[in-house]
Image (tube, rainbow, N blue to C red):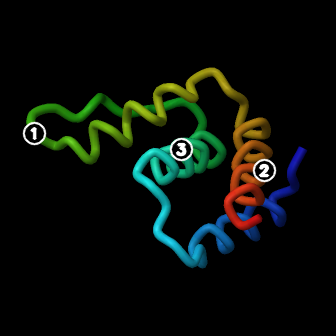
Amino acid sequence: MATQQEFENAVAKSKTLTERPSNDVLLKLYALYKQATEGDVNTERPGGFDFKNIAKWDAWKKQEGKSQDAARQEYVQYVHELVG
């Protein structure tokens, strides 16, 4: 499992990527980050035409049931893949 320090380092690295990741990559990073820091989604799904927040909520919801430790580890691994 990734330590809190490894997770924080990965979060910092994710903000220094040389190219802007695709929306799918950004949503996965967001969802794993939220699952690692807050656990299962704890808000109602946005409605209306708030497409950006709906996509973020849906991505986070897909992580439901994953432990915070597992999400932290997956986040660290994913950032390492992106950084190379």
Image quadrant where residue 14 sits: bottom right
Q: Residue at x 63, y 21 (%)?
A: 65
Q: How many marks?
A: 3
Q: Earlier in the sequence, mark 1 or mark 3?
A: 3
Q: Distance of mark 3 from mark 2, alpha carbons?
A: 12 Å
Q: Left or right? Give the position of 41 relative to 65.
A: left
Residue at image mark 2:
77
| 33 lies above or below 43 | below
* Amino acid type shown at disc 2: Gln
Residue lying at 57% horizontally and 78% vertically, measured from the top left: 18
Q: Looking at the picture, how far across and down is residue 34, in whole percent?
A: 54, 46
In this rendering, the answer to whether 53 lies above or below 8 is above
User: What label does residue 78 carry, if any?
Assistant: none
What x and y, as percent, mark residue 6? 83, 63
Identify the residue at the far left of this view. Answer: 48
- Numbered tag placed on residue 28 in the rendering: 3
Element type at marker 3?
helix
In whole angstroms, how far apart are the C-alphas of marks 1 and 3? 21 Å
- State the residue lying farthest toward the top: 65
Q: Give amino acid for label 3.
A: Lys
| Crowd class of label 1 (few under 14; some 14 to 19; many from 20; radius 10 Å) | few
Residue 11 placement (x, y as % from top left) = 65, 65
Report, in whole angstroms, how far the alpha carbon at label 1 lies from the one at label 2.
33 Å
Q: Earlier in the sequence, mark 3 or mark 2?
A: 3
Look at mark 1 in the image and give the residue it sits on: 49
| Kind of residue at badge 1 | Phe
Check if mark 1's residue and mark 2's residue have beta carbons within 8 Å: no
Which numbered disc, 1 or 2, marks the residue closer to the eye? 2
Judged from the image, the secondary structure of the residue bearing numbered disc 1 is loop
* Residue 80 as seen in the image, left or right of residue 48: right
Q: Is the residue under label 2 in contact with that under label 3 (CB below 8 Å)?
A: no
